[in-house]
Image: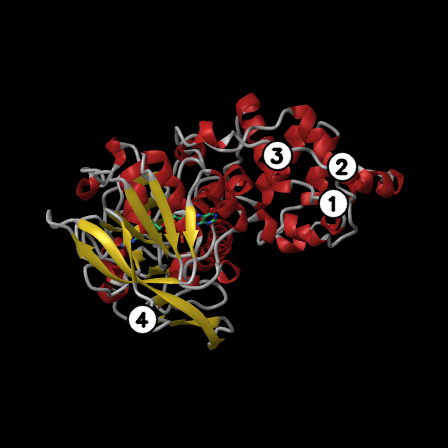
Amino acid sequence: MRSIRGDLLDINRKERAQTPSLEIDNRIPEERICDFNEVNLQLTPEQAMYEASRCIQCPDPAPCVRACPVNNDIPSAMWLISQGKFAEAAKLYRKTSSFPEICGRICPHSQLCQGSCAQSKHDDPVYTGYLEAFVTCYMRCLEGVEYEIADPIDQSIAVVGSGPSGLAVADMLIQKGYSVTVFDSKPEPGGLLLYGIPNFKLDKRVVRDTIEDLVKMGVNFIGNTFIGKDKTIKDLFEEGFDAVFLGVGTGIDASMKTEGEELPGVWKGTEFLIRSSVDEDILPENMKDGIGIGTNVVVIGGGDTASDCLRTAVRVGYKGVTCLYRRTENEMPGSRKDRGLAREEVATYEFLTQPIKFIAGEDGRLASVECVRMELGEPGSDGRRRPEPIEGSNFMVEADTAVLALGYWPDETISNTTPGLKTHNWGLLETDETHATSVEGVFAGGDAVTGPDLVVTAMKTGREAAESIDKYLTGKR
Ligand SMILES: Cc1cc2nc3c(=O)[nH]c(=O)nc-3n(C[C@H](O)[C@H](O)[C@H](O)COP(=O)(O)OP(=O)(O)OC[C@H]3O[C@@H](n4cnc5c(N)ncnc54)[C@H](O)[C@@H]3O)c2cc1C
Protein backbone atom coordinates (compact mmCIF):
# COMPACT_ATOMS: atom_id res chain seq x y z
CA MET A 1 0.00 0.00 0.00
CA ARG A 2 2.87 2.30 0.73
CA SER A 3 3.70 2.32 -2.99
CA ILE A 4 0.25 3.69 -3.78
CA ARG A 5 0.48 6.42 -1.21
CA GLY A 6 3.87 7.53 -2.46
CA ASP A 7 6.57 8.94 -0.29
CA LEU A 8 4.53 9.71 2.80
CA LEU A 9 7.48 11.29 4.54
CA ASP A 10 6.84 14.23 2.25
CA ILE A 11 3.41 15.07 3.53
CA ASN A 12 2.90 17.81 6.03
CA ARG A 13 0.58 16.18 8.55
CA LYS A 14 0.22 19.34 10.59
CA GLU A 15 -0.91 21.36 7.58
CA ARG A 16 -3.37 18.64 6.60
CA ALA A 17 -4.72 18.43 10.15
CA GLN A 18 -5.35 22.18 10.11
CA THR A 19 -7.19 22.20 6.78
CA PRO A 20 -10.84 22.95 7.57
CA SER A 21 -13.38 20.38 6.44
CA LEU A 22 -15.55 20.82 3.38
CA GLU A 23 -19.06 22.20 3.94
CA ILE A 24 -21.14 19.21 2.82
CA ASP A 25 -24.50 20.39 1.51
CA ASN A 26 -27.80 18.53 1.65
CA ARG A 27 -30.79 19.64 -0.38
CA ILE A 28 -32.87 22.06 1.70
CA PRO A 29 -35.70 20.38 3.67
CA GLU A 30 -38.52 22.36 1.97
CA GLU A 31 -37.33 21.05 -1.40
CA ARG A 32 -36.40 17.49 -0.49
CA ILE A 33 -39.69 16.60 1.25
CA CYS A 34 -41.46 17.10 -2.09
CA ASP A 35 -39.85 14.04 -3.67
CA PHE A 36 -38.03 10.78 -2.95
CA ASN A 37 -34.76 11.86 -4.56
CA GLU A 38 -31.50 11.57 -2.62
CA VAL A 39 -30.93 14.16 0.08
CA ASN A 40 -27.17 14.54 -0.42
CA LEU A 41 -25.76 16.73 -3.17
CA GLN A 42 -22.97 15.15 -5.19
CA LEU A 43 -19.40 16.40 -4.70
CA THR A 44 -17.49 18.00 -7.55
CA PRO A 45 -14.04 16.56 -8.46
CA GLU A 46 -12.38 19.68 -6.96
CA GLN A 47 -14.31 19.31 -3.69
CA ALA A 48 -13.40 15.61 -3.53
CA MET A 49 -9.69 16.33 -4.03
CA TYR A 50 -9.79 19.02 -1.37
CA GLU A 51 -11.58 16.87 1.21
CA ALA A 52 -9.40 13.81 0.55
CA SER A 53 -6.29 15.92 1.05
CA ARG A 54 -7.36 16.43 4.69
CA CYS A 55 -6.46 12.78 5.41
CA ILE A 56 -3.31 12.84 7.53
CA GLN A 57 -2.30 9.36 6.31
CA CYS A 58 -2.15 7.58 9.65
CA PRO A 59 0.41 4.80 9.67
CA ASP A 60 -0.79 1.21 9.12
CA PRO A 61 -3.02 -0.12 10.48
CA ALA A 62 -4.98 3.12 10.17
CA PRO A 63 -7.96 3.40 12.53
CA CYS A 64 -10.42 3.93 9.63
CA VAL A 65 -9.29 0.68 7.96
CA ARG A 66 -9.72 -1.21 11.20
CA ALA A 67 -13.17 0.33 11.74
CA CYS A 68 -14.37 -0.64 8.24
CA PRO A 69 -15.94 -4.13 8.39
CA VAL A 70 -14.40 -5.01 5.00
CA ASN A 71 -11.13 -3.16 5.74
CA ASN A 72 -11.28 -0.85 2.73
CA ASP A 73 -7.84 0.71 2.25
CA ILE A 74 -9.20 4.18 2.95
CA PRO A 75 -5.90 6.08 3.44
CA SER A 76 -4.62 4.90 0.04
CA ALA A 77 -7.94 5.81 -1.56
CA MET A 78 -7.77 9.27 0.05
CA TRP A 79 -4.22 9.66 -1.24
CA LEU A 80 -5.27 8.74 -4.78
CA ILE A 81 -8.35 10.98 -4.73
CA SER A 82 -6.33 13.92 -3.44
CA GLN A 83 -4.02 13.43 -6.48
CA GLY A 84 -7.01 13.30 -8.86
CA LYS A 85 -6.32 9.60 -9.56
CA PHE A 86 -10.03 8.75 -9.42
CA ALA A 87 -9.93 5.60 -11.55
CA GLU A 88 -7.25 4.02 -9.35
CA ALA A 89 -9.14 4.96 -6.18
CA ALA A 90 -12.39 3.45 -7.51
CA LYS A 91 -10.58 0.22 -8.45
CA LEU A 92 -9.05 0.06 -4.98
CA TYR A 93 -12.49 0.23 -3.33
CA ARG A 94 -13.80 -2.49 -5.65
CA LYS A 95 -11.04 -4.86 -4.48
CA THR A 96 -12.53 -5.14 -0.99
CA SER A 97 -16.15 -4.16 -1.57
CA SER A 98 -18.77 -5.60 -3.92
CA PHE A 99 -20.78 -2.35 -3.95
CA PRO A 100 -18.86 0.70 -2.80
CA GLU A 101 -21.39 3.13 -4.34
CA ILE A 102 -24.00 1.68 -1.99
CA CYS A 103 -21.81 1.51 1.13
CA GLY A 104 -20.54 5.04 0.45
CA ARG A 105 -24.15 6.21 0.74
CA ILE A 106 -25.69 4.20 3.55
CA CYS A 107 -23.03 2.81 5.87
CA PRO A 108 -23.28 4.45 9.30
CA HIS A 109 -19.93 6.16 8.66
CA SER A 110 -20.01 8.14 11.87
CA GLN A 111 -19.90 4.84 13.77
CA LEU A 112 -17.36 3.21 11.44
CA CYS A 113 -14.60 4.82 9.32
CA GLN A 114 -15.45 8.48 9.95
CA GLY A 115 -16.07 7.80 13.63
CA SER A 116 -12.50 6.57 14.05
CA CYS A 117 -10.83 9.26 11.88
CA ALA A 118 -7.89 10.90 13.65
CA GLN A 119 -9.09 14.29 12.36
CA SER A 120 -12.27 14.02 14.42
CA LYS A 121 -10.26 14.63 17.61
CA HIS A 122 -10.09 18.35 16.78
CA ASP A 123 -12.27 18.93 13.69
CA ASP A 124 -14.80 17.15 11.49
CA PRO A 125 -13.58 13.76 10.28
CA VAL A 126 -12.55 13.33 6.66
CA TYR A 127 -15.84 12.60 4.90
CA THR A 128 -14.71 9.19 3.68
CA GLY A 129 -18.25 7.93 2.98
CA TYR A 130 -19.09 10.76 0.59
CA LEU A 131 -15.71 10.31 -1.10
CA GLU A 132 -16.22 6.56 -1.59
CA ALA A 133 -19.64 7.20 -3.16
CA PHE A 134 -18.32 10.09 -5.27
CA VAL A 135 -15.30 8.37 -6.75
CA THR A 136 -16.96 5.04 -7.54
CA CYS A 137 -20.03 6.68 -9.13
CA TYR A 138 -17.92 9.22 -11.01
CA MET A 139 -15.78 6.48 -12.55
CA ARG A 140 -18.83 4.36 -13.37
CA CYS A 141 -20.31 7.28 -15.32
CA LEU A 142 -17.03 8.11 -17.03
CA GLU A 143 -15.58 4.70 -17.86
CA GLY A 144 -18.02 2.03 -16.64
CA VAL A 145 -16.93 -0.80 -14.39
CA GLU A 146 -14.59 -3.53 -15.60
CA TYR A 147 -14.43 -7.02 -14.15
CA GLU A 148 -12.16 -9.94 -14.80
CA ILE A 149 -13.93 -13.26 -15.11
CA ALA A 150 -11.90 -16.46 -14.74
CA ASP A 151 -12.27 -19.42 -17.13
CA PRO A 152 -15.64 -21.18 -16.73
CA ILE A 153 -15.88 -23.91 -14.07
CA ASP A 154 -18.48 -26.61 -14.57
CA GLN A 155 -20.09 -26.21 -11.14
CA SER A 156 -23.09 -24.11 -10.16
CA ILE A 157 -24.30 -22.33 -7.05
CA ALA A 158 -27.85 -21.43 -6.06
CA VAL A 159 -28.03 -18.22 -4.04
CA VAL A 160 -31.29 -17.84 -2.13
CA GLY A 161 -32.03 -14.18 -1.41
CA SER A 162 -30.80 -11.21 -3.44
CA GLY A 163 -29.99 -8.79 -0.61
CA PRO A 164 -26.42 -7.56 -0.01
CA SER A 165 -25.18 -10.93 1.29
CA GLY A 166 -26.53 -12.88 -1.71
CA LEU A 167 -25.34 -10.25 -4.21
CA ALA A 168 -21.84 -10.33 -2.69
CA VAL A 169 -21.71 -14.14 -3.03
CA ALA A 170 -22.86 -13.87 -6.65
CA ASP A 171 -20.28 -11.14 -7.36
CA MET A 172 -17.37 -13.17 -5.98
CA LEU A 173 -18.30 -16.58 -7.43
CA ILE A 174 -19.21 -15.41 -10.94
CA GLN A 175 -15.77 -13.76 -11.17
CA LYS A 176 -14.17 -17.04 -10.15
CA GLY A 177 -15.84 -18.71 -13.16
CA TYR A 178 -18.76 -20.53 -11.49
CA SER A 179 -22.28 -20.50 -12.82
CA VAL A 180 -24.52 -18.59 -10.37
CA THR A 181 -28.31 -18.40 -10.12
CA VAL A 182 -29.97 -16.10 -7.59
CA PHE A 183 -33.53 -16.88 -6.46
CA ASP A 184 -35.73 -14.37 -4.67
CA SER A 185 -39.34 -14.38 -3.55
CA LYS A 186 -39.73 -10.73 -4.61
CA PRO A 187 -40.21 -9.70 -8.26
CA GLU A 188 -36.94 -7.70 -8.55
CA PRO A 189 -33.53 -8.46 -6.98
CA GLY A 190 -31.95 -6.25 -4.30
CA GLY A 191 -33.47 -7.38 -1.00
CA LEU A 192 -33.83 -4.51 1.47
CA LEU A 193 -31.71 -2.31 -0.81
CA LEU A 194 -34.76 -2.14 -3.06
CA TYR A 195 -37.67 -3.21 -0.84
CA GLY A 196 -36.91 -1.35 2.38
CA ILE A 197 -34.25 1.36 2.36
CA PRO A 198 -35.96 4.45 0.94
CA ASN A 199 -34.83 6.12 -2.26
CA PHE A 200 -33.93 9.39 -0.46
CA LYS A 201 -31.12 7.46 1.29
CA LEU A 202 -30.17 5.17 -1.57
CA ASP A 203 -31.21 5.89 -5.14
CA LYS A 204 -32.60 2.70 -6.67
CA ARG A 205 -30.66 3.50 -9.84
CA VAL A 206 -27.46 2.76 -7.90
CA VAL A 207 -28.80 -0.65 -6.82
CA ARG A 208 -29.94 -1.45 -10.36
CA ASP A 209 -26.51 -0.48 -11.77
CA THR A 210 -24.90 -3.02 -9.42
CA ILE A 211 -27.35 -5.73 -10.43
CA GLU A 212 -26.88 -4.92 -14.11
CA ASP A 213 -23.12 -5.47 -13.64
CA LEU A 214 -23.86 -8.94 -12.26
CA VAL A 215 -26.24 -9.73 -15.14
CA LYS A 216 -23.55 -8.64 -17.63
CA MET A 217 -21.08 -10.93 -15.87
CA GLY A 218 -23.50 -13.83 -16.34
CA VAL A 219 -25.46 -14.11 -13.06
CA ASN A 220 -28.94 -15.50 -13.63
CA PHE A 221 -31.68 -13.86 -11.49
CA ILE A 222 -34.99 -15.65 -10.93
CA GLY A 223 -37.67 -13.65 -9.08
CA ASN A 224 -41.07 -14.57 -7.60
CA THR A 225 -39.68 -17.89 -6.32
CA PHE A 226 -40.06 -18.62 -2.63
CA ILE A 227 -37.59 -21.34 -1.62
CA GLY A 228 -39.23 -23.59 0.95
CA LYS A 229 -42.62 -23.08 -0.73
CA ASP A 230 -42.18 -23.14 -4.53
CA LYS A 231 -39.19 -25.50 -4.27
CA THR A 232 -37.01 -26.82 -1.45
CA ILE A 233 -33.25 -26.85 -0.90
CA LYS A 234 -33.34 -30.58 -1.73
CA ASP A 235 -34.99 -29.71 -5.08
CA LEU A 236 -32.13 -27.28 -5.82
CA PHE A 237 -29.52 -30.03 -5.33
CA GLU A 238 -31.63 -32.41 -7.44
CA GLU A 239 -31.76 -29.77 -10.19
CA GLY A 240 -27.94 -30.00 -10.30
CA PHE A 241 -26.70 -27.15 -8.11
CA ASP A 242 -23.45 -28.09 -6.34
CA ALA A 243 -23.78 -25.68 -3.41
CA VAL A 244 -26.41 -23.38 -1.95
CA PHE A 245 -26.02 -20.02 -0.16
CA LEU A 246 -28.83 -18.78 2.07
CA GLY A 247 -28.99 -14.98 2.36
CA VAL A 248 -32.65 -14.73 3.26
CA GLY A 249 -32.45 -11.90 5.82
CA THR A 250 -34.86 -11.46 8.72
CA GLY A 251 -38.04 -10.72 6.83
CA ILE A 252 -40.71 -10.77 9.54
CA ASP A 253 -41.54 -7.41 11.16
CA ALA A 254 -41.97 -7.73 14.95
CA SER A 255 -45.47 -7.11 16.27
CA MET A 256 -46.56 -5.41 19.51
CA LYS A 257 -49.23 -7.91 20.56
CA THR A 258 -51.39 -4.93 21.51
CA GLU A 259 -55.17 -4.64 21.29
CA GLY A 260 -56.31 -3.19 17.96
CA GLU A 261 -53.10 -3.97 16.10
CA GLU A 262 -55.10 -5.65 13.34
CA LEU A 263 -57.15 -2.48 12.57
CA PRO A 264 -56.98 -0.97 9.08
CA GLY A 265 -54.51 1.90 9.31
CA VAL A 266 -51.99 -0.01 11.46
CA TRP A 267 -49.00 -1.06 9.34
CA LYS A 268 -45.77 -2.98 9.82
CA GLY A 269 -42.74 -0.77 9.07
CA THR A 270 -41.38 -2.58 6.02
CA GLU A 271 -44.78 -2.93 4.39
CA PHE A 272 -45.44 0.79 4.94
CA LEU A 273 -42.10 1.65 3.31
CA ILE A 274 -42.64 -0.71 0.38
CA ARG A 275 -46.23 0.31 -0.31
CA SER A 276 -45.49 4.02 -0.13
CA SER A 277 -42.28 4.26 -2.10
CA VAL A 278 -41.55 1.25 -4.32
CA ASP A 279 -42.52 1.63 -8.01
CA GLU A 280 -45.87 0.00 -8.70
CA ASP A 281 -44.57 -2.29 -11.46
CA ILE A 282 -42.20 -4.09 -9.08
CA LEU A 283 -44.52 -4.24 -6.05
CA PRO A 284 -45.33 -7.75 -4.82
CA GLU A 285 -48.91 -8.67 -5.90
CA ASN A 286 -50.30 -8.44 -2.32
CA MET A 287 -49.08 -4.83 -1.91
CA LYS A 288 -50.33 -3.21 -5.11
CA ASP A 289 -53.17 -1.31 -3.40
CA GLY A 290 -51.00 1.37 -1.73
CA ILE A 291 -51.50 2.62 1.83
CA GLY A 292 -54.46 5.01 1.56
CA ILE A 293 -52.76 8.10 3.01
CA GLY A 294 -54.34 9.80 6.04
CA THR A 295 -53.61 12.98 8.03
CA ASN A 296 -51.75 12.03 11.22
CA VAL A 297 -49.31 9.16 11.52
CA VAL A 298 -47.49 7.83 14.57
CA VAL A 299 -44.38 5.73 14.05
CA ILE A 300 -43.57 3.45 16.98
CA GLY A 301 -39.91 2.56 17.55
CA GLY A 302 -36.47 4.15 17.89
CA GLY A 303 -34.25 2.53 15.24
CA ASP A 304 -33.30 3.43 11.68
CA THR A 305 -36.48 1.90 10.29
CA ALA A 306 -38.46 4.35 12.44
CA SER A 307 -36.51 7.31 10.98
CA ASP A 308 -37.07 5.97 7.45
CA CYS A 309 -40.83 5.60 8.10
CA LEU A 310 -41.11 9.13 9.55
CA ARG A 311 -39.31 10.65 6.58
CA THR A 312 -41.36 8.58 4.12
CA ALA A 313 -44.59 9.70 5.81
CA VAL A 314 -43.58 13.35 5.43
CA ARG A 315 -42.94 12.79 1.72
CA VAL A 316 -46.21 10.98 0.97
CA GLY A 317 -48.17 13.88 2.47
CA TYR A 318 -49.07 13.25 6.14
CA LYS A 319 -49.56 16.55 8.02
CA GLY A 320 -48.72 15.31 11.53
CA VAL A 321 -45.77 12.92 11.75
CA THR A 322 -44.79 11.80 15.26
CA CYS A 323 -42.44 9.18 16.59
CA LEU A 324 -43.47 7.45 19.83
CA TYR A 325 -40.59 5.90 21.76
CA ARG A 326 -40.77 4.31 25.20
CA ARG A 327 -37.32 5.40 26.42
CA THR A 328 -35.49 8.74 26.03
CA GLU A 329 -33.48 9.92 23.03
CA ASN A 330 -30.26 8.81 24.77
CA GLU A 331 -31.31 5.16 24.53
CA MET A 332 -32.48 5.36 20.90
CA PRO A 333 -30.57 2.82 18.78
CA GLY A 334 -31.07 4.57 15.42
CA SER A 335 -28.61 6.93 13.73
CA ARG A 336 -28.43 10.45 15.21
CA LYS A 337 -27.83 11.85 11.72
CA ASP A 338 -31.06 10.34 10.37
CA ARG A 339 -32.98 11.71 13.37
CA GLY A 340 -31.52 15.16 12.67
CA LEU A 341 -32.68 14.93 9.04
CA ALA A 342 -36.14 13.74 10.15
CA ARG A 343 -36.44 16.71 12.53
CA GLU A 344 -35.41 19.12 9.77
CA GLU A 345 -38.21 17.58 7.70
CA VAL A 346 -40.58 18.44 10.57
CA ALA A 347 -41.14 15.05 12.18
CA THR A 348 -41.66 15.33 15.96
CA TYR A 349 -40.71 12.96 18.81
CA GLU A 350 -42.61 11.92 21.94
CA PHE A 351 -40.24 10.16 24.31
CA LEU A 352 -41.12 7.99 27.32
CA THR A 353 -44.36 7.07 25.55
CA GLN A 354 -45.71 3.54 25.20
CA PRO A 355 -48.79 2.84 23.04
CA ILE A 356 -51.08 0.35 24.80
CA LYS A 357 -54.17 0.22 22.58
CA PHE A 358 -55.16 1.05 18.99
CA ILE A 359 -58.73 2.41 18.90
CA ALA A 360 -61.09 2.40 15.89
CA GLY A 361 -63.36 5.25 14.82
CA GLU A 362 -66.93 4.83 13.54
CA ASP A 363 -65.67 3.71 10.14
CA GLY A 364 -63.76 0.81 11.74
CA ARG A 365 -60.36 2.29 10.87
CA LEU A 366 -57.71 3.45 13.34
CA ALA A 367 -58.69 6.80 14.89
CA SER A 368 -56.52 7.13 17.99
CA VAL A 369 -53.83 5.44 20.03
CA GLU A 370 -54.02 5.13 23.80
CA CYS A 371 -50.58 5.67 25.35
CA VAL A 372 -49.05 5.64 28.79
CA ARG A 373 -46.15 7.73 30.05
CA MET A 374 -43.03 5.82 31.06
CA GLU A 375 -40.13 6.46 33.39
CA LEU A 376 -36.74 4.77 33.33
CA GLY A 377 -36.04 2.23 36.07
CA GLU A 378 -33.05 0.00 36.81
CA PRO A 379 -30.88 -1.30 33.92
CA GLY A 380 -32.01 -4.62 32.38
CA SER A 381 -29.79 -7.52 31.24
CA ASP A 382 -28.83 -5.52 28.11
CA GLY A 383 -27.46 -2.68 30.29
CA ARG A 384 -30.18 -0.24 29.16
CA ARG A 385 -32.49 1.28 31.78
CA ARG A 386 -35.87 -0.41 31.67
CA PRO A 387 -38.91 1.73 30.82
CA GLU A 388 -41.71 1.39 33.42
CA PRO A 389 -45.27 2.73 33.08
CA ILE A 390 -46.40 5.58 35.34
CA GLU A 391 -49.73 4.55 36.78
CA GLY A 392 -52.69 6.71 35.77
CA SER A 393 -50.73 8.62 33.12
CA ASN A 394 -52.79 7.32 30.18
CA PHE A 395 -53.48 9.75 27.34
CA MET A 396 -54.75 9.64 23.76
CA VAL A 397 -52.97 10.52 20.54
CA GLU A 398 -55.11 11.18 17.46
CA ALA A 399 -53.82 9.17 14.52
CA ASP A 400 -55.41 7.59 11.47
CA THR A 401 -52.21 5.67 10.70
CA ALA A 402 -49.75 3.87 12.97
CA VAL A 403 -46.54 2.26 11.78
CA LEU A 404 -44.79 -0.39 13.90
CA ALA A 405 -41.01 -0.17 13.45
CA LEU A 406 -40.03 -2.52 16.24
CA GLY A 407 -37.43 -4.87 14.81
CA TYR A 408 -37.30 -8.06 12.75
CA TRP A 409 -37.46 -11.83 13.12
CA PRO A 410 -36.23 -14.57 10.81
CA ASP A 411 -38.75 -16.34 8.58
CA GLU A 412 -38.47 -20.05 9.41
CA THR A 413 -39.92 -21.44 6.15
CA ILE A 414 -36.53 -22.67 4.92
CA SER A 415 -35.41 -24.17 8.22
CA ASN A 416 -38.80 -25.89 8.59
CA THR A 417 -38.51 -27.44 5.13
CA THR A 418 -34.83 -28.42 5.23
CA PRO A 419 -34.17 -31.49 7.38
CA GLY A 420 -31.04 -31.10 9.54
CA LEU A 421 -30.71 -27.31 9.11
CA LYS A 422 -29.86 -26.08 12.59
CA THR A 423 -31.12 -22.74 13.96
CA HIS A 424 -30.72 -20.88 17.22
CA ASN A 425 -31.88 -17.59 18.81
CA TRP A 426 -35.49 -17.71 17.59
CA GLY A 427 -34.70 -19.04 14.14
CA LEU A 428 -31.36 -17.52 13.09
CA LEU A 429 -29.33 -19.96 10.97
CA GLU A 430 -26.42 -21.63 12.74
CA THR A 431 -23.11 -21.54 10.86
CA ASP A 432 -19.47 -22.34 11.65
CA GLU A 433 -16.52 -19.97 11.08
CA THR A 434 -16.53 -20.86 7.36
CA HIS A 435 -20.21 -19.84 7.10
CA ALA A 436 -21.19 -23.48 6.49
CA THR A 437 -24.54 -24.56 7.95
CA SER A 438 -25.25 -27.96 9.45
CA VAL A 439 -26.33 -29.29 6.02
CA GLU A 440 -23.52 -30.30 3.66
CA GLY A 441 -23.05 -27.91 0.76
CA VAL A 442 -25.33 -25.26 2.30
CA PHE A 443 -23.75 -21.98 3.44
CA ALA A 444 -25.40 -18.89 4.92
CA GLY A 445 -24.71 -15.25 5.77
CA GLY A 446 -26.19 -11.80 6.27
CA ASP A 447 -28.99 -10.92 8.68
CA ALA A 448 -30.36 -14.50 8.58
CA VAL A 449 -27.26 -15.52 10.56
CA THR A 450 -26.29 -12.38 12.51
CA GLY A 451 -29.77 -10.96 13.12
CA PRO A 452 -30.69 -7.50 11.79
CA ASP A 453 -27.45 -5.64 11.12
CA LEU A 454 -25.96 -3.58 8.29
CA VAL A 455 -25.51 -3.73 4.53
CA VAL A 456 -21.73 -3.77 4.90
CA THR A 457 -21.72 -6.65 7.41
CA ALA A 458 -24.10 -8.67 5.21
CA MET A 459 -21.78 -8.03 2.27
CA LYS A 460 -18.75 -9.06 4.32
CA THR A 461 -20.29 -12.40 5.34
CA GLY A 462 -21.32 -12.99 1.73
CA ARG A 463 -17.79 -12.38 0.47
CA GLU A 464 -16.31 -14.66 3.12
CA ALA A 465 -18.89 -17.39 2.43
CA ALA A 466 -18.04 -17.18 -1.29
CA GLU A 467 -14.39 -18.00 -0.46
CA SER A 468 -15.54 -21.00 1.59
CA ILE A 469 -17.89 -22.19 -1.17
CA ASP A 470 -14.99 -21.94 -3.63
CA LYS A 471 -12.81 -24.07 -1.33
CA TYR A 472 -15.63 -26.58 -0.82
CA LEU A 473 -16.30 -26.93 -4.55
CA THR A 474 -12.60 -27.04 -5.41
CA GLY A 475 -12.34 -29.97 -2.99
CA LYS A 476 -15.19 -31.73 -4.78
CA ARG A 477 -13.65 -31.36 -8.25
C1 LIG B 1 -35.96 0.10 6.59
C2 LIG B 1 -34.54 -0.35 6.71
C3 LIG B 1 -33.54 0.59 6.56
C4 LIG B 1 -32.20 0.18 6.67
N1 LIG B 1 -31.23 1.12 6.50
C5 LIG B 1 -29.93 0.74 6.53
C6 LIG B 1 -28.90 1.69 6.32
O1 LIG B 1 -29.14 2.87 6.13
N2 LIG B 1 -27.60 1.25 6.33
C7 LIG B 1 -27.29 -0.06 6.53
O2 LIG B 1 -26.10 -0.42 6.50
N3 LIG B 1 -28.26 -0.98 6.76
C8 LIG B 1 -29.57 -0.62 6.76
N4 LIG B 1 -30.54 -1.54 6.98
C9 LIG B 1 -30.15 -2.94 7.23
C10 LIG B 1 -29.78 -3.68 5.93
O3 LIG B 1 -30.72 -3.37 4.94
C11 LIG B 1 -29.72 -5.18 6.17
O4 LIG B 1 -28.83 -5.43 7.23
C12 LIG B 1 -29.24 -5.92 4.92
O5 LIG B 1 -30.07 -5.63 3.81
C13 LIG B 1 -29.24 -7.43 5.16
O6 LIG B 1 -28.87 -8.08 3.97
P1 LIG B 1 -29.24 -9.62 3.71
O7 LIG B 1 -28.59 -9.99 2.45
O8 LIG B 1 -28.94 -10.41 4.91
O9 LIG B 1 -30.81 -9.68 3.56
P2 LIG B 1 -32.01 -8.77 2.88
O10 LIG B 1 -31.48 -7.51 2.38
O11 LIG B 1 -33.03 -8.78 3.92
O12 LIG B 1 -32.41 -9.67 1.66
C14 LIG B 1 -33.01 -10.94 1.84
C15 LIG B 1 -33.68 -11.34 0.54
O13 LIG B 1 -34.07 -12.71 0.64
C16 LIG B 1 -35.35 -12.88 0.07
N5 LIG B 1 -35.92 -14.09 0.68
C17 LIG B 1 -36.23 -14.30 1.99
N6 LIG B 1 -36.67 -15.56 2.16
C18 LIG B 1 -36.64 -16.14 0.93
C19 LIG B 1 -36.98 -17.43 0.47
N7 LIG B 1 -37.40 -18.38 1.31
N8 LIG B 1 -36.87 -17.69 -0.86
C20 LIG B 1 -36.43 -16.73 -1.74
N9 LIG B 1 -36.08 -15.49 -1.32
C21 LIG B 1 -36.18 -15.21 -0.01
C22 LIG B 1 -36.08 -11.60 0.43
O14 LIG B 1 -37.16 -11.36 -0.47
C23 LIG B 1 -34.97 -10.56 0.28
O15 LIG B 1 -34.95 -10.07 -1.04
C24 LIG B 1 -31.89 -1.18 6.92
C25 LIG B 1 -32.91 -2.11 7.08
C26 LIG B 1 -34.23 -1.70 6.98
C27 LIG B 1 -35.32 -2.71 7.17
- The residue pinned by badge 2 equals 20
**Mark 4 surroundings: few (<14), some (14-19) or many (≥20) residues within 10 A:** few
Question: Is the distance from the Cβ of mark 1 to the nearest ligand 1 atom less than 8 Å?
Answer: no
Contact, mark 3 vs mark 4 (Cβ under 8 Å): no
Residue 384, image x, y percentages: 49, 71
Contact, mark 3 vs mark 2 (Cβ under 8 Å): no
Q: Who's the residue at 76% across and 36% down the image?
A: 20
Q: The residue under label 2 is which amino acid type?
A: Pro
Q: Marks 1 and 4, Cα distance to the nearest angstrom?
A: 48 Å
Examine the rendered structure and indicate whether residue 410 appears above or below residue 79. Answer: below
Sooner in the amino-acid sequence: mark 1 or mark 2: 2
Q: Nearer the viewer, mark 4 or mark 2?
A: 4
Q: Is residue 282 left or right of residue 424?
A: left
- The residue pinned by badge 3 equals 90
Sooner in the amino-acid sequence: mark 3 or mark 1: 3
User: Label for residue 136?
Assistant: none
